[in-house]
Image (spheres, coloured by chain):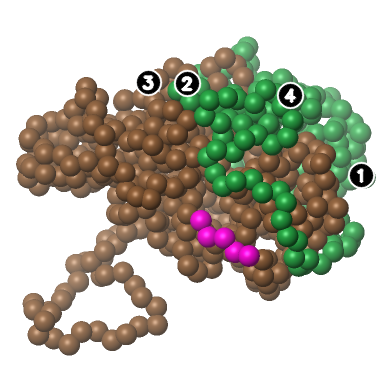
Chain colours: A green, B brown
Amino acid sequence: MRRGAWRVAALVVMGGAACRESVPAPQAEGPPRVEASTPVVREGPRYGLGRLATAGEIAAVDLDVSPDGTGLPPGSGTAVQGAEIYRQKCGICHGQKGEGMSTVYPALIGREPRQGFPFGTDWKIVKTVGNYWPYSTTLFDYIRRAMPYTAPGSLSNDEVYALTAHLLAANEVIAKNAALDAASLAAVRMPAHDRFVPDDRRGGPEVK
Amino acid sequence: MTDLTRRDLLTGAAALVGGAVLAGLPAVADGQAKPAVPPRPTVPPDPTKVTGGATTAVGSRSAFEHPVRTPAGETTGYSLTPLQDLTGTITPSDLHFERHHAGVPAIDPEQHHLVIHGLVERPIVFGLEDLKRFPAVTRVHYLECSGNGRTSYREPKPEMTPQKVYGLTGNTEWTGLTVAQLFREVGVKPEAKWFLAEGGDACLMSRSVPVEKGWQDALIVWGQNGEPLRPEQGYPLRLLLPGFEGNMSVKWLRRLELGAAPWMTRWETSKYTDPLPDGTSRQFSFAMDATSIITAPATPSLLSAKGWWPVTGLAWTGRGKITRVEVSVDGGRNWHDAELQEPVLDMAHTRFSYPWEWNGKETVLLSRATDQTGYVQPMRARLLEVRGQGTDFHFNHIKGWRIRPDGKIFYHGET
């Protein structure tokens, strides 16, 4: 989905949380009316507490990656390199073939063979990177911030690129011998990309 | 270590975890631990004839009472609030459900900071002391994991208790300050439409939140029922987004980044999205729909005699106030308005009660909540029709209890 569309979605969602009878049109400007909570007060005193953050302080924690590639660091890695890192650091929990273990260590590899994204009707279909994740950048972001489970933050950026490449290749999203860097990762389009829709629940009598 | 197989992990890890030496492998506990109930304590036959106990530094429950959470998983997982053991609306802090994705971190409050940056005029670092110098607000709000009720939706079983059916919720008096106050401090730019909230746990939990929610009613809290947050609830600092799915109220909060678009983190794409029967998946389904559950009479208690039994439970909605709760004592043929305990608060558990005279025959008790938007809690069959069996979150279907002539009570999930 286009990024602009999510801004619209946000307005609609917030309106749904608040409005009894009217839902703000997607093009509505400004904050939606809040009925269900305390009044929105944008203006008010400033107390000047805290201190200005330095660029270094922000950089030390600002690790997030956006779908357009913003935040991806320099570096690169290949699927072949990633397969070896995976074998050493990931397979014991997620399975050497990415099949997962119990419900705690999710399956990572596998494409849903049936047509039509049938997750809504069959909860036993295992969601994987290949059949469910809508953005390739999420994979890099999550591995870098949280994996391996017992040593989060221990991978180099090159290793994270390599693991990302391995998992995308194993899911048949990119070629088996592909290499990834910031530009090529952000360009990867995931199979489930178009399956996600914004929340359309609004409160009121309709059950959605 | 080299001989450790995955089967070993599945079957033995819980027992071995104490010696985390096992290459530091994360523990798996598939079943729910069932703590043994201690033997009934011995007390004097006539307590009016014996001097009582001394004062204590920290109080404890009566030795006759043993409400417990039901922990599942050792380093990641959840534990459930024992709804059937609680009265009123406030969840005792030590019984509040937990859900964490990489364990409970140990954080020194003096070392903990919150940095706010991105599309702001002034990126600012706040220590705990800085935050506590702002005007504080105290509000009562519920939290609910949006996975609450999943098992009872997909595979209801008669032996389920309120805790097992619906225990991923709690209701708390929170103390902190408004996110709006901090937005004013940093000067949020008009082009900022979302903010990323990030926790300081081992997975750096991160969720994108519409900036409007920050201006509306979001809180950053350090107080839980009159004392600092429990570690499981985010000590020393957490985000609190009233009415939104619990995962978004990021615990151990260390960072807010203002941005123009959502970040599409793992927890808002591969998790916390709702596959629908039409082949799409609903994303950013923030608000929790109106819901309720009868907490008594309920499994595993027993109706020991015919006659009056109060039917009581909790109702809540992510869209403001509960306006009505109806109770059926005949499986849904007739509905009666229950009394709502005042005050009824926005995005807070609301206690309801209905006096019921049991005639000793088999029947089914149900509760149905309505909120201020006019939304009425649906039957499970209706939710299945609309959302399908594969939907992964938001299970606010009507839940019931079957009363047997012998007084035994069983979960009635097929509503």
**Residue type, numbered disc 2:** Glu
Figure quadrant of residue B356: top left
Where residue A27 is drawn, which disc sits there? 4
Contact, mark 3 vs mark 2 (Cβ under 8 Å): no
Q: What residue lies at 45% left-to-right and 34% top-to-bottom?
A: B372
Q: Counting residues from the N terminus, which is met first, the one under dot 4 or under dot 1?
A: 4
| Distance between the alpha carbons at the discs numbered 4 and 2 | 23 Å
| Residue B385 x %, y % | 44, 17
Q: Chain of mark 3?
A: B
Locate residue A23 relative to residue B408 in the image: left or right.
Answer: right
Disc 1 is placed on an element classified as loop
The region drawn magenta spans: B135-139
Q: Chain ID for label 2? A: A
Q: Do marks 4 and 2 share a chain? A: yes
**Mark 3, residue position:** B381
Q: Which mark is residue A206?
A: 2
